[in-house]
């Protein structure tokens, strides 16, 4: 009988928390969050900055940010990347998918790392600010590198869009993601039992 209880505690499929690995529950929650974020990227997108209709916002960043803050940076990274994979088959294609992954990843992972060290309300605000700054910077750099490749424009053409279009859009995007996440984080954490 003692052997049986020992086996249960070392079972890699246990639903209890395992500090060195992912529990079945965490894997299931990650899959659910990936699905929710993917649905957002595919079916919920709209312009958020007047006059810049070609840059569209989708709320998948909120889902990825919640995943990172509740379950840690690794889960946030997985949701940030996997949720955009369906875009390979869409009009935005490979380059749009890469840019979206980098923008979300660079928001979620730094925020989750900071929040992991300080889980207080102040730590939450600091983590969101750090993630927002890193994400906006990464988004602008990625636009300068990738947009000339797939849009067949020069880097100077893209640089001319930084202040009037890219900065306002990316700042608005991360602001929405961070504010909504800050508002819903505690209720969502309670709802999923974290």
Image (cartoon, rainbow, N blue to C red):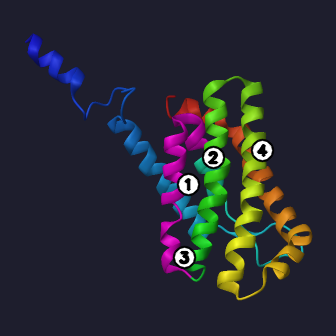
Tell me the element at label 1: helix
- First in residue order: circle 3 vs circle 4: 3
Q: Nearer the viewer, residue 112 or 44?
A: 112
- First in residue order: circle 1 vs circle 4: 1
Q: Main secondary structure of the magenta part?
A: helix
Which residue lies under the disc numbered 3?
94
Name the image quarter holding residue 118.
top right
Q: CA distance from mark 1 to mark 3?
A: 15 Å
**In magenta stretch: residue 135:** no
Tell me the element at label 4: helix
Quadrant where the N terminus sits is top left
**In magenta stretch: residue 83:** yes
Q: CA distance from mark 3 to mark 2?
A: 21 Å
Which residue lies under the disc numbered 2?
108
Name the image quarter holding residue 48.
bottom right
Q: Are marks 1 and 4 in contact (CB under 8 Å)?
A: no
């Amino acid at each position: 009988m003692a052997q049986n209880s020992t086996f249960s505690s070392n079972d890699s499929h246990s639903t209890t928390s395992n500090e060195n690995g992912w529990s079945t529950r965490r894997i299931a929650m990650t899959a659910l969050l990936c699905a929710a974020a993917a649905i957002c990227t595919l079916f919920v997108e709209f312009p958020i900055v007047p006059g810049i209709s070609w840059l569209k916002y989708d709320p998948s960043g909120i889902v990825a940010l919640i995943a990172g803050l509740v379950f840690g940076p690794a889960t946030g990274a997985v949701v940030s990347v996997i949720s955009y994979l369906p875009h390979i088959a869409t009009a935005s294609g490979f380059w749009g998918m890469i840019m979206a992954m980098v923008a979300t990843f660079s928001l979620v992972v730094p925020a989750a790392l900071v929040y992991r060290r300080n889980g207080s309300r102040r730590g939450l605000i600091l983590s969101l600010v750090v993630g927002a700054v890193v994400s906006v910077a990464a988004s602008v750099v990625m636009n300068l590198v990738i947009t000339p490749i797939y849009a067949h424009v020069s880097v100077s053409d893209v640089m001319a869009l930084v202040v009037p279009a890219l900065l306002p859009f990316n700042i608005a995007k991360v602001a929405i993601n961070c504010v909504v996440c800050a508002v819903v984080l505690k209720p969502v954490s309670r709802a999923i039992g974290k």
